[in-house]
Amino acid sequence: MEPTILKRPDHNVSRKNISSAAIKVLYRLKDEGCTAYIAGGGVRDLLLNRNPKDFDVATDATPEQLRKMFKNCRLVGRRFRLAHILFRGEIIETATFRAPVPEDETIHSDNTFRTGEEGMVMRDNVFGTPEEDALRRDFTVNALFYNIADFSIIDYAGGLDDLKKKIIRVIGDPDTRFAEDPVRMIRAARFAGTLGFEIEKEAYDSICRNKDKLASAASSRMYEEVQKLFFCGHAKAVFQWLERTGLLHPMFHDFSHWLDEDKARQGWVIQTLEQMDRWRKANLRVHPGVLFALPFGEYHEFLIQQLIDKGSSPHDATRNAVQGHLRGMCENVRVPKQVIYQVCDIMANQSRFQKTQGKRPQRFMQTKGFLDAFLYFKFSAKVHNRNQELLEFWTNLRQQKVKKAE
């Protein structure tokens, strides 16, 4: 298959918009006689005049060759053997071109290729050509290459046309590709929401059919994806795609059913995601504890009140409700214990904002979890129009503390 090639005068991608670390890796590979491309989302974003969050390199050099070539190289992964080339403050992920999923996997050892019972790829270290690698990728808009040798854009999968049409299209049969890696369904929703694209109808229908396959995805990968969803800068739009495709149910089973019981409950979720989008656009860092406390906050408050109504103390109700929900969610999304404890502290600390007498406020403000708890308190006060006097008290107290520090 002959690729579509855009020569340098015919596209907008410039080396000045690519990180200096990625450029160093590309030129070192080129000087060693290797083929070296910027691959995937970095090329897509540059063509769309967006700032890529990272740059991935694809090459015909094997992982072992890369390790010998770069002293600052570390090989990672078993399922996909990758090279992380380390620079100060940046990692350039470098992968060897991969071949198609073999029809007869028995010709390969378990160390190179293996699938699970339902077709999910468990290990994939069979190397191939640039064309084979492009056609192995998930979506056409992620299968574009930037060639450092002549500064051209190479397209084997029709990604350039789909960029123009603003479509997320699966490469190959969607049912097969989602069976190989169910997380691709979430990625489709994330890319559609982030880029403002539509999901192509065949892929959309396949997601709706296959959404329950997410149960077989690695829970650690799901946690990584959920963090990306919450803090991609377009969390509201992504949430709407997750809801439309039905992906919310296998991701957050109990929570999604609670939302379905009363659609008005989505108001809190939408406003939290809008707030996260504002933080992301302002380049503010938010702790994972806050990322998980805010969207699920109203649901946690509902669960806490249920336990209090049954006779639990507020303290026990808070701990049991939050930990019960998040630990139960770990079957699908493995939330780290530290994050669960942080969410518990945020919710448990809400009652401390009611206590404004004596030295309690000053002591509370000096605790490690105060700021995260205050972010939640401030947000919930504004959304529900409650505790306005308390909010004013704590806001003034914090301002006084800042002035004293100055």
Image (spheres, rainbow, N blue to C red):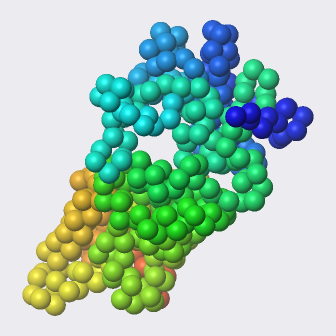
List the single residue furthest toward the left.
311
Quadrant of the rendering where the N terminus is positioned: top right
Compared to 161, does 354 lie above or below? below
Q: Find residue 158 and report its horizontal and vertical position in percent.
A: 71, 47
List the single residue furthest toward the front.
104
Q: Find residue 273 and report its horizontal and vertical position in percent.
A: 51, 70
Closer-to-camera residue (132/254): 132
Which residue is depicted at the point 47% across and 9% down?
Answer: 68
Which residue is depicted at the point 33% across and 75% down?
Answer: 255
Which residue is depicted at the point 25% across and 59% down?
Answer: 330
Compared to 327, does 99 lie above or below? above
Judge from the rendering whether residue 198 lies leftward or rightward of residue 62; answer left or right: right
Compared to 227, does 29 lie above or below? above
Residue 340 visible in the current orientation: no
List the single residue furthest toward the right.
9
Q: Find residue 262 and report its horizontal and vertical position in percent.
A: 39, 90
Q: Find residue 383 and report its horizontal and vertical position in percent.
A: 48, 83
Question: How many numbered marks does the figure carry?
Answer: 0
Closer-to-camera residue (64/305): 64
Residue 333 visible in the current orientation: yes
Which residue is depicted at the point 35% across and 65% down?
Answer: 212
Compared to 245, does 87 lie above or below? above
Closer-to-camera residue (122/310): 122
Judge from the rendering whether residue 397 lies leftward or rightward of residue 195; answer left or right: left
